[in-house]
């Protein structure tokens, strides 16, 4: 179909930019109304592309004439987009994104606050841990004891954050290994098992992401451990600010026993039964 009659819109006439120009030929438009942007109402793709090109060219010319204002506008727009992106990233990670555990709504972390001492958010005593495990009220119970230790048998000694965990700890969380395996029932030996799961960060930092790291021996303080797995890159222990480099398996009977129940020690997690 042919194009309809051109429509001239005089941008200089702020009172009524359209009145008096619709349906008039370009030669009939007074010169005082220029500059004009001619828009032809066409159904062809070529006319649409030309209109968009003319609009873009006009926008660029206008922005170039007032470069200071254009720079401030672009800077404000960039800062606004950046701030909104950062805010959404935080909200998504903290509020919207699900925790990287199996059925996270069933996981509970048990802590103790001392009323006579200014100590809050500490672990349970060892007898309380065994009471929870033997109560039958929960689907699973596991302890996790963070300890700072020295890592040797590598290029340079390094102070690392480690964690003594029960053999069922990873299975309770529903977390597998990124490489190799995590602890299972075969590692449930009395005392501290001679196997370790290292973090993805330590694997890349100290072992150069070597796929043959499994089976290598490392020394944590005075004890030797064999690496059996590498944790997934996004793995973090439940709780606040808990990040470790090495997880060491420990059988429940191997926890340091305390005779008094008001002595805290072991941060404990349990999974509520799905049947209530």
Image: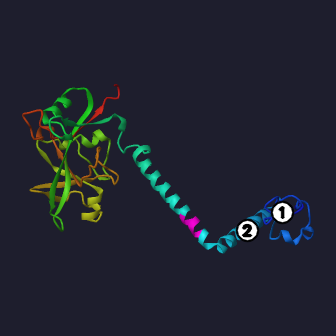
Quadrant for residue 36, please give it: bottom right
**Residue 22 among magenta residues:** no
Residue 60 position by quadrant? bottom right
Query: How many numbered discs sit on the rendered protein?
Result: 2
Q: Residue at (26%, 33%) from the top-left corner?
A: 140
Q: Which mark is residue 40?
A: 1
Q: Label 2's element?
A: helix
Q: Is 7 positioned to the left or the right of 226 in the image? A: right
Q: Nearer the viewer, residue 118 or 184?
A: 118
Mark 2 — residue?
A: 53
Position of 68 with respect to 156 (left or right) is: right
Q: Residue at x 81, y 59 (%)?
A: 15
Q: Which residues are magenta?
A: 70-75
The quadrant of the image that shows the N terminus is bottom right
Outermost residue toward the front in this view: 15
Q: Position of residue 25 (x, y in %)?
A: 92, 66
Going 8% across and 33% down the picture, which residue do you hit?
260
């Amino acid at each position: 179909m042919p194009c309809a009659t051109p429509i001239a819109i005089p941008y200089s006439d702020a009172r009524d930019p359209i009145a008096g120009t619709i349906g008039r030929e370009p030669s009939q438009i007074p010169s005082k109304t220029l500059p004009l942007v001619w828009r032809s109402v066409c159904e062809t793709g070529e006319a649409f592309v030309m209109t968009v090109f003319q609009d873009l060219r006009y926008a660029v010319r206008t922005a170039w004439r007032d470069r200071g204002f254009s720079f401030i506008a672009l800077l404000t727009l960039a800062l606004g987009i950046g701030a909104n992106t950062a805010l959404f990233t935080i909200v998504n990670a903290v509020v919207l994104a699900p925790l990287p555990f199996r059925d996270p709504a069933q996981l509970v972390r048990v802590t103790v606050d001392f009323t006579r001492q200014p100590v809050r958010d500490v672990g349970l005593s060892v007898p309380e841990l065994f009471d929870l495990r033997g109560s039958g009220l929960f689907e699973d119970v596991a302890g996790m004891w963070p300890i700072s230790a020295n890592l040797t048998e590598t290029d340079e000694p390094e102070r690392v954050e480690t964690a003594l965990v029960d053999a069922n700890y990873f299975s309770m969380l529903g977390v597998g290994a990124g490489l190799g395996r995590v602890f299972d029932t075969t590692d449930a030996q009395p005392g501290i098992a001679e196997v370790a799961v290292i973090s993805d960060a330590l694997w890349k930092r100290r072992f150069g992401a070597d796929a043959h790291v499994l089976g290598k021996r490392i020394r944590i303080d005075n004890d030797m451990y064999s690496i059996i797995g590498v944790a997934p890159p996004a793995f973090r222990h439940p709780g606040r600010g808990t990040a470790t480099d090495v997880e060491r398996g420990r059988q429940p009977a191997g926890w340091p026993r305390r005779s008094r129940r008001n002595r805290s020690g072991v941060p404990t997690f349990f999974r509520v039964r799905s049947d209530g």
